[in-house]
Amino acid sequence: MSRFSELLLSAVLLCGSPGAAEAAGHFPNLGRAATPDEVKAWDIDVRPDFKGLPPGSGTVAHGADVWEAKCASCHGTFGESNEVFTPLVGGTTKEDIETGRVGAYIRGDAPQRTTLMKVATVSTLWDYINRAMPWNAPKSLTHDEVYAVLAYILNLGDIVPADFTLSDKNIADVQKRLPNRNGMTTKHGLWDIKGKPDTKNVACMKNCTSHVTLASSLPEYARDAHGDLAEQNRKVGAVRGQHTGGDGDAVATVNPGVALMKSQGCSGCHGIGNGIVGPAFRDVAKRYKNDKDAESRLVGHVKNGSGGNWGDIAMPAQTQVSDADVTALIRWILSGSPEN
Amino acid sequence: MSQLPARPGRIRRAPEGFLSPRDIREVAAGRRDFLRNAFVAASTAVAGSSLALAAEGDPAILDLPEHSKTLGRPVAERPYGTPSQYEAGLRRRESPGLTRVAQSSVSFAPLQGMFGIITPSGLHFERHHQGWHDIDPARHRLMVNGLVKEARVYTMDDLMRMPSVSRIHFIECGANTGMEWGNVAVPTVQYSHGMLSCSEFTGVPLSVLLDDCGIDLKRAKFVFAEGADGSSMTRTISLDRALDDVLVAWGQNGEMLRPENGYPLRLVVPGVQGVSWVKWLRRIEVGDQPWATKDEAVHYIDLLPDGTHRQYTSLQECKSVITTPSGGQTLLDRGFHNISGLAWSGRGRVKRVDVSTDGGRNWRTARLETPVLTKALTRFNIDWVWDGSPAILQSRAIDETGFVQPSYAQLRAVRGTRSIYHNNAIQSWKLAETGDVSNVQVF
């Protein structure tokens, strides 16, 4: 702060008049005031007290349409999918809605934690869907679509009825029905800068324990699941890596096609063996197995975008990819997308 | 590649450069015959040269290598230098099956092969939620708004003209070691602790920018940081931290940030988990309440045994790990070894690190290598002579507040086993008679 007062002082001196020392803009000619439109364009956050929530509304029924068109491919029709991310819906009960505590945690029988089992503030979902979903086209939804699709998700969790219209007017009431709304605590030592730790070890030096019990060791499959560890260590120095994984370095032998599909962004929408938004690459190869013109046609489809061949969702033009890379990718896809 | 058997234990079979499982058994059994055989083979290999016939010793010395007898390569052949071809194994890697899509995933830094405290920028761990971008810095803007006298916009030109500081800090993902909460799950320190890096960051203190906008210190309690990527990653930071040592940084290890690490601008929140170090930083808002954004309300929350979640867990508590030797490695031989590792604390400096080779019965204090900096990785080393018997290696760090890194039993007693985040338990590596090191947990 003292450095700052020096700067302030020099700014005042530079300006020549003490009156020029405003409370903002202390570095001559660095930065400028934001225009109201600029702030509006970027200040999209919505807080738990709904500060920042734009007016609007959407029905569960409309939400179901938005969901089917823009979300279901990754999250499943009922938000249950585990393919791309953990499920959004499931694991909450009527009783949870009443108490605001998810019973599965208390009983300890939750097989997995869905979004609705965790989220304690409905603003979180509105804010996140608005800023980041759909994952492959963030910030493309209208405000009413966000209300609608959120209403649909909440209906899947029986938090709102099927004929519900969610709006800025009633969202605070919905908040009172979130299954885990009372499930969070901020009373711990890992938030505040002066927070107190919750574990207390002592630095014993001699004869600290009478016997050491091996509680857990690495299962054989886990040892082999990370490729050849010998290839992941330096080949000079104090140690060497152990030979594991059987067939060599998992990473070094990856087919360039796999690397390319990741680096060019295809993997956000396509899996090799599984479809995401677009079809699995192996299904593409199967469909065009005997089609001689497939290569040039598919190159065109990827470069210019295409739709209607696999479903309702279109592939946007992949203009970021060079012609050479598109051709390499299509050849690799048509050859069955070998992984190494 | 073959080496002088000045002490037989130093020779290795050429050209692979590692011991086969059979060789290791031989070493463990104290038999060194095969090493002598290797020496004979190496001598035969150079028998064609008259020098070798006359002289006795290591062909790596006696038979001058090509690089001693030829002209090397020119300057600037590689305008941006890259590591030696022999270092290709040390790279960031994904843990198979951990995540479903590569744009919301993690790559781990190869701690098992690193020295000192600085992470080479190309090996810095990665965690993105919606993929990374290489953003044109000329089009990047930082906006500060909210409880300030004047909402302001800065270009990169503006920011980089400001009075900057350079500081070395660690960054650790809150989920580092998260796979190990319940039991041992991964083979090496890369996967168990590799969401950890340490760099010198250069930037302007956030407090300077907040002052420049005229922050309303009467009402302000929190700041909010937001990224420019698709996820527009957002986190709430308490004001005491924001005014303490947080930086708005563009520099990393003497160059600009790498795109994967937020080029051209990121927040540096020393001592706090990585998710708060918002990358591709586009906006800071000052407010009077936390925001409960997705990655502080639904993720990066810690599930306790009683079924509540701790929210806004941010601090990375004192922790350490032995990196050499570590899981998945094999000791070349009995005899002298330098046990080496890393220690760090989100609360300040590391004061001391103790090392045990008997599973925590007895401890010896390790040497801390300089520099020992606040909220930075600290390298520790300790001498050790391995007699060939089984051992369990552990390190235990203590920070300047006196906090002692907990054991798994102590951590689980408070937090259970169902959490994902903030596992700072003492790590154990089991050393078998064969020289093989593996990941274990002990009580």
Image (cartoon, coloured by chain):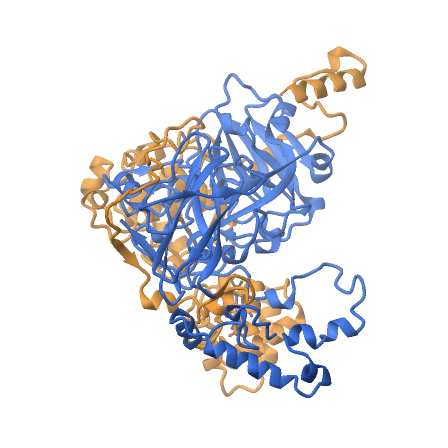
| Left or right relative to B278: residue B70 | right
Tell me the residue at 62%/52% (across/down): B259
Tell me the residue at 33%/35% (across/down): A202
| Left or right relative to B327: residue A304 | right
Residue B350 in percent (x, y) is at 48, 37
Residue A336 in percent (x, y) is at 49, 80
For the question of whether residue A54 can be seen, the reply is: no
Chain B: its colour in the image is blue
With respect to residue A302, does A203 lie above or below? Answer: above
With respect to residue B301, does A319 lie above or below? Answer: below
Q: Which sits in the foreground, B201 or A74?
A: B201
Q: Which sits in the foreground, A130 or A106?
A: A106
Residue A316 in percent (x, y) is at 56, 62
Counting the numbered discs, the total is 0
Residue B174, picture quadrant: top left
For the question of whether residue A41 can be seen, the reply is: yes
Which quarter of the rendered picture does the N terminus of chain A lie within? top right
Q: Which sits in the foreground, B59 or B173?
A: B59
Q: Which chain corresponds to the colour orange?
A: A
Tell me the residue at 50%/25% (across/down): B240
